Amino acid sequence: MNPKLILLLIIIIPLLGAFIGFILGRIKEKIRDLFNIFITGVILALVTYLYPIVSYETINLSISDIMGVGLHLKLDMFRYIFVWLTCFIWFLVTIYSTQYLVSYKNRNRYYLFFMLTLWSTIGVFISEDLINLFTFFEIMSLASYPLIIHDEDAYSHEAGQTYLIMAVTGGLVLLMGLFLLYDYTQTLRISELKVALLNIGWIKYVITSLIIFGFGVKAGMVPLHIWLPKAHPAAPAPASAILSGILLKTGIFGILITSQLIVSEDEKVAIVILILGFITMVSGGFLAMFQRNIKRILAYSSMSQMGYIIVGIGLMGILKEHKAIALYGTLYHIINHVFFKVLLFMLAGIIYMVLHELSINSIGGFGKGRKLITVMFFIGFCAIIGMPGFNGFISKNLLHHALTEAMIVYPIYWRIICESIFTLSGAFTTAYLLKIFIAVFMEDNNDADRKIKTNITNIAIFPIIILSILIIFIGIKPSFIIDILDMAVTTFNVSGGLDVKFYTLSNIKSSFVSIIIGTLIYTFFIRKVLRKEKDNKWWYENIALNWFSVERNVYSPTINFIFKISSVILKLCDEGLIHMINFINNSFASLGEIQLEFRKNIKKKVPKKVINISDIKRSSVNFDKTLVKKTINDEIDKMGYKMNSITYSIYIFAIVLAIFLVVLLGI
């Protein structure tokens, strides 16, 4: 089969499947569920079929007359990793969703937007032109919004509002960056931009900042992360799994191609990304320790893990031609995070299916006696903390080696600070995962009368078992992933063939240092400070609820201030415009009266008995004064009515822009 045809099919099938599935769901939901599993399975099979082809050549496909610039798709081994992971996870989550959503309403709506999100996410990863990428990126943001607000309660709507505001803001900033980029380079083709940006001067840093801002929102990068800890707990568990496992990677993908393929090896950009990565990594882990809702803990955990990946991207820019180990570590951790975080969110969903509750204080002791679930959660726990024998150990050690190598050229105090943050972030990960594991799977049950809402089905467990096996397999046999990465790194002008011994005494020692520190933090801080106990009942307090919040203490006051200032300015403009219109109105009225008086004087001087053409023309000025004045005033009033508010003009502009975008997308 033609590879280009398959590339086209993997972008068309989920789009058509979304609407066909919606129609089938109106007829019979069981048929729709089977159809969605079939469609995601077919897409996964097609992508898997492309592996041997993509491993030795890049597939390019261009279709003109779409979105003005044409549709330009590209699939190399680097992009293939993201596409295959997306299709694989969507297939597993679709199977899981058929069991999880049994007691939910609006299932048909959920699956429609679930499949549209799949379509747009694949589009992001295979777009070769940034305008194509931006279009899919924005569609993905809007399509995933109904997944977040699916419960339609007050909290989910609040979370959805925050998500939408951040997504739209990030999209507009990204679009501004793309406008500037095109203005200075006359191209938005990713493969051409590296050369095009060489001679545009300092403006490239403005452009890069705007683009990274737009992608950083979706990646959950500090300080643009505020939607993430709200959206994950609000969404159903399957949606949380794809939000954390896949959608965050679209932001990472954008930051990666911007910093490495567009402004490659720029140390200034790399240092900024590295600092933001460290802040994201440590703050996400720190805040996760205080949370009580499992999905909120996992949301902050995702933020922290994105920090590791962003640090890896920053290290690539600092190491420049020696960036191979940072590149391998970054891509390996992207793969690892997909597996262990989707696993943990699915397990959180299993708990919710049974109890309809996710607060540690209410579900304590749930896992006692449930050996299979306990074992699978323990696998995810060991993976994310970097325990030897599990996949997280490999990628974290690669990133740690890259950090050590990059810091050699910097003063000793910078090395100590970076090393301390890296170790402490890993310790926080151990601490908050221990909090969940011991409370849910080892503590005694607080509620003897707890009612079971739903029984766990084997179909819901199947995807979790698959992910557990993969986590152990690529942890024990890292060469399986390394061989794939050998082909992917060539996109970044790095020769494949990384030769690293992972299970050395030094690497194992480094991993256990972080784990031991995390265990101490759990024992002496979480257990002693956050955990309370009375009358043989225990609970956790969140003392961070009233701490400094970026959203509450920075964004909300700033937006309110801008709104108030804008209101005052617009009011002044509005009143000034009205006064100007009234002045023009009065001026025209006065002018009309003067002209009328002048023409009346002319009329008196014309002899009545002389009748010729010139007299006829001259007599045409003899019209009624009140009629003239009324006509002028009416026109001025109409003009004043149309222009009496600057807000009206803004609305008109917004409507025209919206129509333009609709037409553009339709084309």
Image (tube, rainbow, N blue to C red):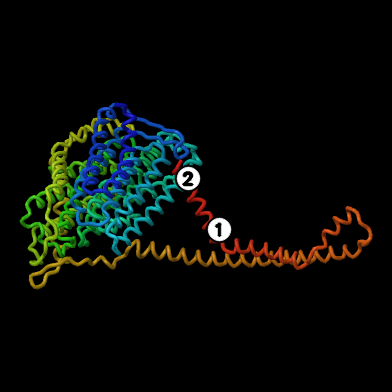
> Of the residues under marks 1 and 2, which one precedes in the sequence?
1
Q: CA distance from mark 1 to mark 2?
A: 21 Å
Asked if residue 601 shows in the view, the reply is: yes
- Quadrant of res 253: top left
Q: Secondary structure at mark 1?
A: helix
Query: For mark 2, does the 10 Å Cα neighbourhood hold few (<14), some (14 to 19), or many (20 or more) residues?
Result: few
Return the x and y of residue 412 as percentages of the image width and height.
28, 48
Q: Nearer the viewer, residue 211 or 637?
A: 637
Residue 204, label in figure: none
Return the x and y of residue 46 as percentages of the image width and height.
26, 33
Q: Would you name the residue on which mark 1 appears? A: 649
Residue occupying image coordinates x 17% and y 37%: 478
Q: Nearer the viewer, residue 557 or 402?
A: 557
Q: Is residue 506 above or below residue 610?
A: above
Residue occupying image coordinates x 29% and y 35%: 80
Query: Callout 1, which amino acid?
Result: Ser
Q: Would you name the residue on which mark 2 appears? A: 663
Q: Quadrant of the N terminus?
A: top left
Asked if residue 248 shows in the view, the reply is: no
Residue occupying image coordinates x 45% and y 46%: 177
Q: Secondary structure at mark 2?
A: helix
Return the x and y of residue 633 as percentages of the image width and height.
69, 65
Number of marks present in the image shown: 2
